[in-house]
Image (tube, rainbow, N blue to C red):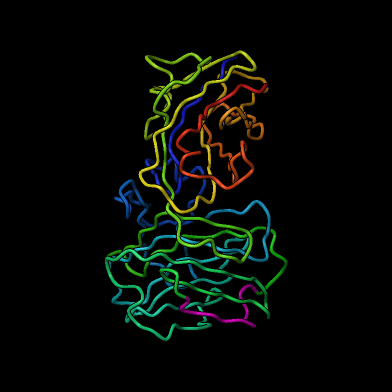
């Protein structure tokens, strides 16, 4: 039995096809689906629209594996118009019922609200914070509680709302929260999202740019390409069974050099190695997303495969060769690829 793998794209900055969106976000809507549009720094972003009102429906939900009592989020955001109330994002419980969320009003003030009725908790003093057809970077620090909750909201690094001692999540204990992208109140409006991050602590990371670096060369390869060169079969912008690498030998490892960062950032929060893989017959098969930094090989957790392509993420916050935060030099020299672990 062989395993096939392909390197596709990173969900956040490079939503290249709906399989990428659906590999991490769960659709929760009956109206029009997402549209892929140009992101704020090129690449692609996701655009949503809906007729739903505050606290009644959201389009795409990111499920947390546990029920955090606090979380932070950051994302680039652009509204096509701000002539009416608009929703931006909601936090929901395991039943996809609204706990709290953020939106804006017709004069561009930010609003934070709770519950399915969209009860306003606070409104920013300043107007014009969400201008039409303009990218802004929004960050939220949220503590979930029926009576001692808090929400701090930032736009382009400046705090615009800070409210505490409020209801940000009434009801039974939260088994699972979902962070939901939420569109405006009319299908003639649209919200666009890019460069999204989430954490399970209420401390923002600062504005982030998520850049997708695809395989650009072979370093050492042991998997069999479907055609041509190994790296070229796994550096596409969509996931398909047309181009891939495959192997049936446990321990086989492909390593690829990656494209360089487009700029030299002052700091790098993490590196996420992403692959899509499937097994081609019955029986247990597992891969790891492997990276090599300098002379240090770091295997991600073993990922047991199904009979269709699934997304696999391996996040590394520090450089395994140094134990220190990543630098641009370290990222640019990184080798990545799949290893057949079982």
Q: Which residues are magenta?
A: 159-169
- Asked if residue 128 lies left or right of residue 94, the reply is left
- Where 265 sits versus 128, above or below? above
The residue nearer to you, when weighing 57 against 297, is: 297
- Where 151 sits versus 29, above or below? below
Residue 165, located in which quarter of the rendered image? bottom right
Quarter the N terminus occupies:
top right
- Where 49 sits versus 129, above or below? above
215 falls in the magenta region: no
Question: Where residue 240 sits: x, y (%)?
Answer: 41, 28
Question: Where residue 43 sits: x, y (%)?
Answer: 33, 46
Residue at (59% x, 18% y) in the render: 281
Q: Residue furthest bottom?
A: 125
- Asked if residue 70 lies left or right of residue 157, the reply is right
Quarter the C terminus occupies:
top right
Residue at (55% x, 64% y) in the render: 204
The residue nearer to you, when weighing 51 against 168, is: 168
- Secondary structure mostly seen in magenta is strand
- Where 161 sits versus 290, above or below? below
The residue nearer to you, when weighing 229 against 335, is: 335
Question: Where residue 30 sits: x, y (%)?
Answer: 42, 56
Q: How many marks?
A: 0
Residue at (59% x, 46% y) in the render: 317
Question: Where residue 33 sits: x, y (%)?
Answer: 38, 52
């Amino acid at each position: 039995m062989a395993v096939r793998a392909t390197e596709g794209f990173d969900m956040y900055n490079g939503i290249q096809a709906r399989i990428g969106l659906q590999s991490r976000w769960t659709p929760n809507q009956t109206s029009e689906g997402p549209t892929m549009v140009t992101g704020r720094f090129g690449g692609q972003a996701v655009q949503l629209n809906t007729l739903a009102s505050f606290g009644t429906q959201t389009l795409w939900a990111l499920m947390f594996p546990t029920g955090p009592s606090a979380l932070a989020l950051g994302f680039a955001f652009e509204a096509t118009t701000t002539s009416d109330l608009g929703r931006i994002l909601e936090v929901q419980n395991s039943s996809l019922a609204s706990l709290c969320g953020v939106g804006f009003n017709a004069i561009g003030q930010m609003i934070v609200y709770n519950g399915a009725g969209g009860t306003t908790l606070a409104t920013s003093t300043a107007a014009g914070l969400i201008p039409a057809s303009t990218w802004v970077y929004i960050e939220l620090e949220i503590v979930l509680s029926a009576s001692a909750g808090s929400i701090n909201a930032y736009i382009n690094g400046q705090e615009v709302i800070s409210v505490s001692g409020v209801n940000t999540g009434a009801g039974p204990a939260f088994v699972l929260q979902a962070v939901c992208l939420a569109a405006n109140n009319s299908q003639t409006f649209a919200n666009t999202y890019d460069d999204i991050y989430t954490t399970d602590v209420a401390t923002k990371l600062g504005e982030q740019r998520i850049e997708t670096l695809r395989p650009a060369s072979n370093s050492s390869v042991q998997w069999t390409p479907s055609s041509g060169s190994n790296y070229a079969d796994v550096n596409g912008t969509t996931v398909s069974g047309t181009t891939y690498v495959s192997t049936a030998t446990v321990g086989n490892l492909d390593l690829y050099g990656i494209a360089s960062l487009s700029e030299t950032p002052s700091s790098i929060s993490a590196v996420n190695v992403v692959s899509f893989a499937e097994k081609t017959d019955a029986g247990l098969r597992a891969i790891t997303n492997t990276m090599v930094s300098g002379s240090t090989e770091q295997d991600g957790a073993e990922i047991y495969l199904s009979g269709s392509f699934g997304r696999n993420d391996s996040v590394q916050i520090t450089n395994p060769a140094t134990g220190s935060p990543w630098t641009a030099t370290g990222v640019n020299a990184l080798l990545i690829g799949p290893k057949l672990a079982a």
